[in-house]
Amino acid sequence: MQTNTPTQESWVLEIRNMTQRFGGLTAVSDFNVRLGSNAMAGLIGPNGAGKTTVFNLVSGFYQATEGEIFICGKSTAGLKPHKVTALGVARTFQNIRLWNQMTVLDNIRVAQHGKLEYGFFKAILRSRDYFECEERIEHEARELLKIFELEKYMEEYPTNLPYGLQRKLEIVRALSEKPKLLLLDEPAAGLNSADVQELIRLIQWIHKTFDVTIWLIEHHMDVVMELCDDIKVIDFGQTIAEGSAEHVRNHPAVISAYLGDDNI
Ligand SMILES: Nc1ncnc2c1ncn2[C@@H]1O[C@H](COP(=O)(O)OP(=O)(O)OP(=O)(O)O)[C@@H](O)[C@H]1O
């Protein structure tokens, strides 16, 4: 999957020959991908195909059994998730993972602490750096919530928000980390059709407005087909097709993988 044809070093994400085994099960097999800056790509496949495993590998939750992953040319080998985040990867989850004991505002503020410019001692000593940094984080969090029209929920707890807004908040939280690569794992899961349409518009707007590469897993085919220029299809961990929505939709291997599934 190649988008915007940048030079070799400037792929936002490059995965080379990645394989992931869990005991005797090969969840992902010889997987390759290249995403350039500002790409909007999709990863689809039937249940259990290996999609979330790919995201877990890219975001450092798993270390690949074989192969390599590069974020903007830097290898993620051996890096813990927070170090991968620092390289510019942010994600959302299939099942929303917000911090429900914190307010909406604090969810955004805390997410930004991965990129703090002051250290432990400056925090203890309450130095000027500490206060300036905290002020900036608070300001940015408020601005972001305003931009996404969530400011009236700032002091609410996430569970008090309608489900569609919780999904949106999770995306905003991921964006607050200023990622170069945003991984969205089934953002439309559980949404009604009106909310799905709103989500499509939201993702299109984010893509147009922010300098970020978006990679999306989604079971709603209309969402993937409408949003993504480039779609990769996997089944039992193997890549079975890739290309435009039109190409993938009519590919015999894809039709066969989804046979009996009304979604395609
Ligand atoms: N930590 C793990 N340990 C053992 N097996 C795992 C683990 N994570 C995933 N698997 C297995 O790997 C395979 C791929 O799972 P994965 O969750 O990546 O699929 P998926 O395409 O995201 O599925 P779905 O669309 O249903 O979410 C499945 O057979 C799953 O049971």
Image: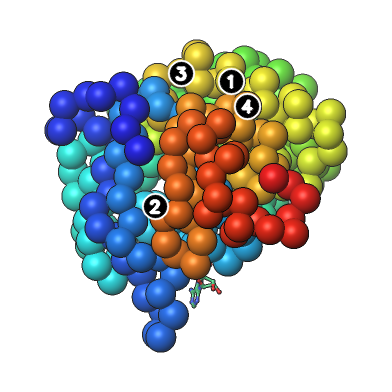
Q: What number is the disc on residue 59?
A: 2
Task: Check the image and report above or below for 143 versus 166.
Answer: above
Q: Tag 2 or tag 3, which sits nearer the N-term?
A: 2
Residue 50 location (% of width, % of height): 49, 62
Nearer to me, 157 or 87: 87
Q: What number is the disc on residue 242?
A: none
User: Which secondary structure, mark 4?
Assistant: helix
Residue under label 3: 210
- Does the residue at mark 3 contact the one at mark 4 (Cβ under 8 Å)? no
Q: Tag 1 or tag 2, which sits nearer the N-term?
A: 2
Quarter the C terminus occupies: top right
Q: CA distance from mark 3 to mark 4?
A: 19 Å
Q: How dense is the environment of label 1, judged by Cα within 10 Å: few (below 14), some, or many (20 and up)?
A: some
Residue under label 4: 226
Residue 150 location (% of width, % of height): 71, 24
Q: Amino acid at mark 1?
A: Gln
The residue sitting at 24% across, 67% down in the picture is 66
Q: CA distance from mark 2 to mark 1?
A: 23 Å
Q: CA distance from mark 3 to mark 1?
A: 10 Å
